[in-house]
Image (cartoon, rainbow, N blue to C red):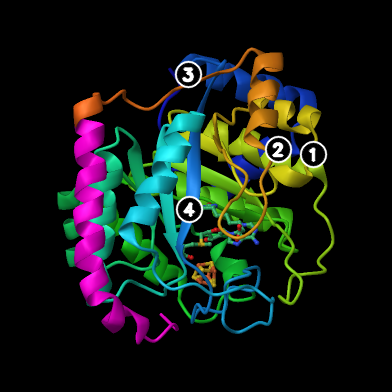
């Protein structure tokens, strides 16, 4: 096992990035093998439960209300629809279901719905993850009590580059939310995006922030920017693919026991590039044809790639037919309840 450290210096991390590619890959793979089965990859499926009209101004995002990206907005999905999508994901082989909302933070009146989603998805035997923006300590506690396994909230980039990407919430706001999630006993999923036009030192700075948190996130998504027309980053220069792989390798070395997720951007990566990302220590992916609003590789293609590489995936806990039937029945009851409130929901302000 490699030592778990929280005192990485900028120069140590720079030195890892500067290694010859083969040396970096060898060292990352060695750390990976000391901590994980090198042929196992965890798979999560994403669903956008509330899409678009987000009040935040993240310059990469299709869902920000600040840019015209031509995205169809959708209000909070019905609970039953979420349960159906979770069942589909489970049947295709996902072990975790991650629900994302384009909110600055959930409003109090949204909470009963998201808590019910957590309970019902969990009842299917899937691990649950949510990403709903900033959380108060109390909201994190409520999610923990509902049984939420993971909360995703990314630092996105280095503190130095951050102001060029988002102005409507601060780096400290993000760190506070991560603190509330950790405090509530929910597992932390936090990573960032590369290819935003940042310098290598910003990738160093992002990984340094993540690795020097009081506890490493259990899950570290590394997203390659998916360029969205209409956003300020829609035409940014491509990042060198080897630099993306290096970022994964360094994340693996700094956070040896965390799952590092090869996240957004796989749609434009060939199979060989993805294999190098797994070699560098990535051991999780988003699986299923859609991320939140943009395409992801076909599930059948991913299964074929895993077979070609001899990669195994963890599957969801097999729940009995009875508990599955109960989960569906409960969802139908909820649907009846929510139709009573649908009129009220329909008049909700779509912005947040
Ligand atoms: N609204 C919530 C928030 O930002 O906290 C949750 C959803 S948001 C889409 C989750 C993360 O997805 C962002 O923090 C960012 O790292 C990543 N992301 C969003 N748009 C992306 C894009 N176009 N390309 C790559 N990653 C993206
Ligand atoms: C994360 O780090 N990546 C996911 C998840 N957390 C929520 C989102 C990727 C979004 C990619 C662009 C889109 O589909 O809108
Ligand atoms: Fe997009 Fe999330 Fe930023 Fe909203 S907060 S613009 S959904 S990344």
Determine which residue is flagged by label 4. 47
Q: CA distance from mark 2 to mark 3?
A: 19 Å
Identify the element where label 1 is drawn.
Answer: helix
Characterize the magenta stretch by its predominant secondary structure: helix
Few, some or many residues within 10 Å of mark 2 (<14, 14–19, 20+): many
Residue 315 appears at what percent x and percent y? Answer: 42, 24
Determine which residue is flagged by label 1. 242
Determine which residue is flagged by label 3. 36
Q: CA distance from mark 3 to mark 1?
A: 23 Å
Residue 320 appears at what percent x and percent y? Answer: 23, 24
Residue 11 is marked as none
Residue 136 appears at what percent x and percent y? Answer: 25, 69
Q: Is label 4 or label 2 in front?
A: 4
Identify the element where label 4 is drawn.
Answer: strand
Marks 3/1 in contact by CB < 8 Å: the verdict is no
Answer with mark 3 or mark 4, whichever residue precedes in sequence.
3
Determine which residue is flagged by label 2. 246
Answer with mark 1 or mark 4, whichever residue precedes in sequence.
4
């Amino acid at each position: 096992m490699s030592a778990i450290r929280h005192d990485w210096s900028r120069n140590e991390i720079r030195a890892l990035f500067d290694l010859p590619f083969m040396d970096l890959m060898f060292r990352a793979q060695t750390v990976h093998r000391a901590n994980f089965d090198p042929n196992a990859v965890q798979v999560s499926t994403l669903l956008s439960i509330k899409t678009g009209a987000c009040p935040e101004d993240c310059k990469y995002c299709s869902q920000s209300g600040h840019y015209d990206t031509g995205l169809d907005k959708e209000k909070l999905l019905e609970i039953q629809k979420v349960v159906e999508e979770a069942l589909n994901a489970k049947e295709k082989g996902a072990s975790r279901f991650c629900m994302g909302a384009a909110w600055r933070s959930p409003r109090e009146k949204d909470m009963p719905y998201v808590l019910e989603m957590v309970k019902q998805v969990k009842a299917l035997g899937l691990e649950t993850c949510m990403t709903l923006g900033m959380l108060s300590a109390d909201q994190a506690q409520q999610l923990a009590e509902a049984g939420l396994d993971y909360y995703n909230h990314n630092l996105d980039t280095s503190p130095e580059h951050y102001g060029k990407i988002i102005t409507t919430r601060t780096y400290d706001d993000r760190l506070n939310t991560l603190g509330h999630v950790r405090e509530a006993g929910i597992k932390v999923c936090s990573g960032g995006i590369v290819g935003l036009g940042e310098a290598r030192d910003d990738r160093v700075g992002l990984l340094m922030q993540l690795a020097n948190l009081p506890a490493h996130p259990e899950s570290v998504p590394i997203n390659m920017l998916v360029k969205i027309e209409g956003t300020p980053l829609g035409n940014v220069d491509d990042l060198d693919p080897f630099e993306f792989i290096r970022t994964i390798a360094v994340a693996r070395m700094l956070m040896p026991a965390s799952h590092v997720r090869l996240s957004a951007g796989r749609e434009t990566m060939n199979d060989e590039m993805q294999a190098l990302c797994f070699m560098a220590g990535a051991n999780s992916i988003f699986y299923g044809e859609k991320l939140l609003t943009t395409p992801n590789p076909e599930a059948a293609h991913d299964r074929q790639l895993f077979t070609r590489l001899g990669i195994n995936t963890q599957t969801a806990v097999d729940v009995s037919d009875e508990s599955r039937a109960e989960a569906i029945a409960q969802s139908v009851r909820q649907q009846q309840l929510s139709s009573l409130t649908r009129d009220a929901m329909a008049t909700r302000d779509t912005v947040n």
